[in-house]
Amino acid sequence: QVQLVESGGGLVQAGGSLRLSCAASGSIFSINVMRWYRQAPGKQRELVAGVASDGSTIYADSVRGRFTISRDNAKNTVYLQMNRLEPEDTAVYYCNVQEILGAFIYDYWGQGTQVTVSS
């Protein structure tokens, strides 16, 4: 079992920056992809960014160029640096970690951290 603990959310003015962290602990064998999702009130959860074990990354169009995802494999931690924040970025941000064990894929979720961007 893998536990995820997120931190770094908060209230920031438009144009500001925040850095989210998500640390994985527990029975970790082989983490594959690490992702950040977000869910705004009344909207579906959406993928924000992801980073694979080889370091390759993907971003939602709405955040590309403003957000940067990175990971520290030694610490089993994924980060999301968010710059030039906009009120539309307001949401609960969730960390997601995928682990592959043989033929089985396991997905783990953090508890979520609130990001609020004021105009």
Image: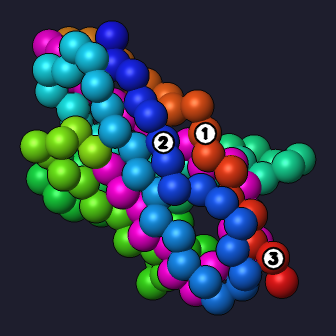
Tell me if mark 3 has few (under 14), some (14-19) or many (20+) residues whose alpha carbon lies within 10 angstroms of its own.
some
Q: Earlier in the sequence, mark 1 or mark 2?
A: 2
The quadrant holding residue 79 is: bottom left
Which residue is labeled 2 in the image? Answer: 6
Disc sitting over residue 118 in the figure: 3
Q: Is residue 87 magenta?
A: yes
Residue 80 vs residue 49, the one in the foreground: 80
Q: Check the image and name the residue furthest to the right.
A: 42
Residue 73 is situated, as x and y percent measured from the top left of the image, at: 14, 45
Question: Do the residues under discs 1 and 2 have CB atoms within 8 angstroms?
Answer: yes
Q: Residue at x 72, y 84 (%)?
A: 14
Residue 93 vs residue 60, the one in the foreground: 93
Q: Answer above or below: position of 44 versus 64.
A: above
| Residue 13 in view here | yes
Which residue is labeled 1 in the image? Answer: 112
Give the alpha-carbon distance from disc 3 to disc 1, as whole Å.
19 Å
| Residue 50 in view here | no
Residue 74 is situated, as x and y percent measured from the top left of the image, at: 10, 43
Type of residue at label 1? Gly
Report helix, strand or loop for mark 2. strand
Quadrant of the snapshot with the C terminus: bottom right
Give the alpha-carbon distance from disc 1 to disc 2, as whole Å.
7 Å
Q: Which residues are magenta?
A: 78-102
Residue 42 is situated, as x and y percent measured from the top left of the image, at: 89, 47
